[in-house]
């Protein structure tokens, strides 16, 4: 796995420097974090990865992440649903991510744009700015802490059968500049996605024209892009680098340095070193379907360091066991420098972290389904008494028939609408059970992630051809 992207990060590093000085994590114990957004928040897992990071890194900090994205929504719609989505959930923190729909991408069509498109483009961007101001004011009036997020990019360079709405990405760039300026004026945390993502995408496409950080539709990132988003969020909000650090001197049989961990029961013989280690955090596990992101951002170097350093060992190779599990062989020089165990998938700690990752994934999937229910209600069931199941069924079945009649029109997006309507008919009765499962998942996560004591042993590997070995 590659962990560095040395030529991409001049801009991103400059943006992140103020955040890196942050002494405390951006979230606090018992925070309820409502993530306001459009489809990129509704369906995308970036906030699930942020939840996973906090769940593994801060076991003493119980957090609740609530997906408040609605596919196809704009800042205007987000303003209209603050009471239902944010205030009714007693949010202490709200993140705001908008822009992709606010710029009204259809105005940039080369074939279907209206005659007054240029004037409408300016009105759309100005409307976005005004609605961001309104949302911020409404959140502040309720004492909700705010984290602003700039829009993601629209990929105008990737070769796709989807019409290229040239000019959309520049409009999103203008929206991003406004969000950065506005958040700074409010002295509020802000995460810049647009500039770093644009930098990565542009440079990668110079080498590989088929590369896209986003996807074939030019709008929605896949898991790789969402892990990049999570990285940018964590990096720019000052998330700490270290899971833990531990340095031991084999010669003096002393702990030289320890951070976020407590080593004890150190015992050293010429062929073996052992100790117990109480660890206050778990590593961030490998996200396999997003693994390509590790080539794009320095996630491991910046956010996932679990370094064990053993000094003054006798020259040779050593087998490391944790809780009697063989997790690898390391040379004396490797251990002298320090080995990062965070990326070692064989460790018991990583296995625990993967369990939490699986739970976070299920948590995200359930949350996304619940948001789909809200989307259908907002977009297709206005004026219908939701407690009248027959009326709801009749309305949605009529809508499905209407969409099926348009299935040959790509612009109608009928497949998506049919799926959402059918999902509502199937899952709306299960919402209470889904919410109960979400709560059970959170309880399980905060049981698995608690500090534990692990037993370590380093045993020198015997080489029968080495005359120095006994």
Image (tube, rainbow, N blue to C red):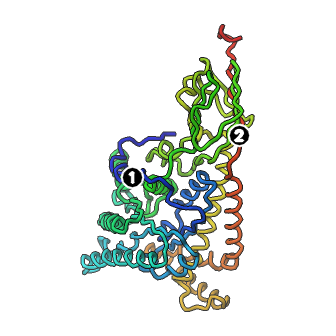
Q: Which residue extends farthest top? A: 467
- Identify the image quadrant of residue 372: bottom right
Expressed as whole percent of the image width and height from the top left, the position of residue 10 reads: 33, 46
Q: Is residue 10 visible?
A: yes
Residue at 35%, 64% in the rendered image: 184
Neighbourhood count class around disc 1 (C-alpha, 10 Å): few under 14, some 14–19, many 20 upward: many
Considering the numbered disc 1 on the image, is that residue within a helix, a strand or a loop? Answer: helix
Front residue of this view, candidates 165 and 407? 165
Q: Which residue extends farthest right? A: 324
Pointer 2 with pointer 1, Cβ within 8 A: no
Residue at 49%, 72% in the rendered image: 144
Label annotation for residue 16: 1
Label annotation for residue 200: none
Considering the numbered disc 2 on the image, is that residue within a helix, a strand or a loop? Answer: strand
In this rendering, the count of numbered labels is 2
- Identify the image quadrant of residue 179: bottom left
From what the image shows, is residue 12 above or below residue 315? below
Expressed as whole percent of the image width and height from the top left, the position of residue 71 reads: 50, 72
For the C terminus, give its image quadrant: top right
- Identify the image quadrant of residue 33: bottom right
Expressed as whole percent of the image width and height from the top left, the position of residue 145 reads: 48, 69
The residue that mark 2 highlights is 454
Cα distance between the residues tagged 2 and 1? 35 Å
Q: Is residue 200 visible?
A: no
Judge from the rendering whether residue 104 lies leftward or rightward of residue 448; answer left or right: left
Expressed as whole percent of the image width and height from the top left, the position of residue 293 reads: 48, 49
């Amino acid at each position: 796995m590659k962990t560095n992207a040395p030529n991409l990060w001049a801009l991103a590093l400059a943006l992140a420097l103020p955040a890196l000085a942050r002494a405390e994590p951006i979230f606090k114990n018992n925070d309820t974090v409502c993530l306001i957004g459009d489809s990129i928040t509704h369906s995308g897992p970036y906030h699930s990865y942020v939840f996973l990071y906090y769940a593994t890194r801060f076991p003493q900090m119980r957090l609740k992440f609530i997906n408040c994205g609605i596919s196809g929504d704009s800042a205007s719609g987000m303003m209209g649903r603050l009471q239902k989505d944010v205030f009714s959930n007693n949010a202490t923190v709200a993140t705001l991510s908008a822009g992709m729909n606010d710029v009204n991408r259809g105005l940039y069509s080369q074939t279907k744009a209206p005659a007054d498109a240029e004037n409408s483009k300016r009105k759309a961007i100005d409307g976005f700015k005004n609605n961001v101001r309104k949302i911020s004011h409404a959140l502040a009036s309720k004492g909700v802490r705010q984290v602003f997020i700039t829009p993601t990019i629209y990929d105008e360079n990737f070769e796709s059968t989807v019409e290229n709405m040239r000019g959309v990405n520049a409009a999103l760039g203008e929206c991003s500049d406004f969000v950065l300026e506005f958040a700074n004026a409010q002295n509020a945390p802000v995460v810049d996605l647009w500039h770093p993502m644009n930098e990565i995408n542009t440079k990668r496409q110079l080498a590989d024209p088929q590369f896209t950080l986003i996807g074939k539709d030019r709008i929605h990132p896949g898991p790789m892009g969402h892990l990049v988003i999570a990285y940018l969020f964590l990096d720019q909000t000052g998330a700490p680098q270290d899971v833990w650090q531990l340095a031991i001197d084999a010669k003096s049989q002393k702990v030289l340095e320890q951070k976020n961990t407590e080593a004890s029961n150190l015992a050293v013989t010429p062929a073996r070193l052992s100790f117990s280690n109480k660890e206050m955090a778990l590593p961030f596990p490998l996200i396999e379907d997003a693994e390509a992101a590790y080539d794009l951002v320095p996630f491991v170097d910046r956010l996932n360091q679990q370094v064990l350093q053993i000094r003054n060992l006798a020259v040779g190779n050593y087998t490391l066991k944790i809780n009697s599990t063989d997790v690898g062989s390391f040379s004396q020089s490797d251990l002298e420098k320090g080995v990062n165990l965070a990326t070692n998938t064989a460790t018991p700690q990583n296995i625990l972290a993967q369990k939490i990752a699986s739970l976070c994934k299920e948590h995200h999937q359930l949350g996304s389904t619940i948001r789909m229910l809200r989307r259908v209600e907002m977009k297709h069931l206005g004026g219908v008494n939701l407690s009248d199941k027959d009326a709801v069924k009749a309305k949605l079945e009529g809508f499905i028939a209407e969409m099926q009649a348009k299935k040959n029109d790509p612009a109608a997006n009928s497949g998506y609408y049919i799926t959402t309507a059918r999902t509502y008919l199937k899952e709306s009765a299960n919402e209470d059970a889904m919410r109960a499962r979400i709560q059970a998942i959170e309880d399980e996560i905060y049981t698995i992630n608690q500090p534990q004591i692990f037993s370590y042993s380093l045993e020198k590997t015997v080489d029968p051809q080495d005359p120095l070995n006994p």
